[in-house]
Amino acid sequence: MKSSNIGGQAVLEGIMMKNKDRYAVAVRKPDQEIEVDVQEYKSIVPWKAVSKIPFIRGIFSFVDSLVLGMKTLMYSASFFEDEEVDAKELTEEEAEKEEKKERILMNLTVAFSVVLAIGIFMVLPYFLSNLVRSYVASHWVLTIVEGVIRVGIFLAYIALISRMKDIQRTFMYHGAEHKCINCIEHGLELNVENVRKSSRQHKRCGTSFLFFVMIVSIIFSFFITAESQVLRVLLRIAMLPLIAGVSYEIIRLAGNSDHCLVNFLSKPGLLIQNMTTKEPDDSMIEVAIRAVEAVFDWRAYENETFGTQYGEDAEQRKHAEQQENTDAADPKEDEV
């Protein structure tokens, strides 16, 4: 199966889909209309050569996804804010100041989220595993205990937030995103019926990426043997960019390979996706389809990958087949 290389995420009552240098956000507004916003994607790294360097590209891709994710999430939330009606429109200068404030707020939110995630999923498991240090002398066993605690906290976190009503709807949109991509990558026409019957699990999902981050961090922790506890914690944090880079390469390989070993390694992440994706309703699928079609020519992709014909090509092919059938049923007389 040839990967479509499109990806996205669920936002508030909508979907963001990204393809190469463009991304689209489709949101179901309170009046039930679908708003689609298409923008040019600008990476935090201006040098495109970086995106071709294995392991290094994963670091910047991870940061890019955080920034873009937060930006599109804030955009979708803007449709549901209780804004006071202001008779006076903002001047150009005031609008620029407002945009600058939003950009600063977004960057601070991303930074805070990263620090909080490091504290909960990296530092906390280490100190909790130290509670059994007096009973376990083996560094290897302690590292495994730390890894089990880390994965346990991760799963507990997902289980906890999945009980929130807004998050449940976000997980449904997440399922719609996966279903659309699976529909396309299996050669089906992109419509509500076909999307509905497609799988909501996908190997390139961010949930699978985070699971690989957990596993890779456990492997790397085996090689941290410093005596100082502070140094061990700092080394764990310092290795995060490398862990993200390695995990990115694994998820990239998984998304482009159907090898049995790759499928086996992807299985745990796919199982966890049962927690982070839910079955969407048809209105959510419609939003996802709008997001895909805004940035991705799925007909051209299926023509190239599966030989499926759509539009004028399909009509020409159908006409040619009908002509061939007519000629076969009514053969010409032999020429004398």
Image (cartoon, helix red, strand yellow):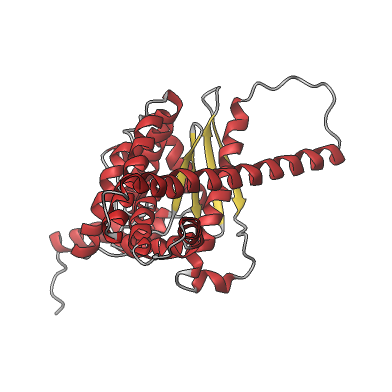
Q: Is residue 200 visible?
A: no
**Position in image of residue 180 (x %, y %):** 37, 45
**Position in image of residue 132 (x %, y %):** 30, 46
Q: Is residue 254 visible?
A: yes
327 in relation to 271, above or below = below
Residue at point 34%, 65% (across, down): 253
Q: How many marks?
A: 0
Residue at point 24%, 56% (across, down): 322
Q: Nearer the viewer, residue 249 or 175?
A: 249
**Res 113 quadrant in image:** top right
* 334 on left or right of 220: left
Q: Nearer the viewer, residue 35 or 251?
A: 251
> Where does the C terminus fall, quadrant-wise?
bottom left
**Position in image of residue 168 (x %, y %):** 39, 29
**Position in image of residue 224 (x %, y %):** 40, 64
* Residue closest to the far front: 134
Residue at point 49%, 48% (across, down): 118
* 330 on left or right of 94: left
* Residue closest to the far bottom: 336
153 in relation to 142, above or below = above
> Where does the N terminus fall, quadrant-wise?
bottom left
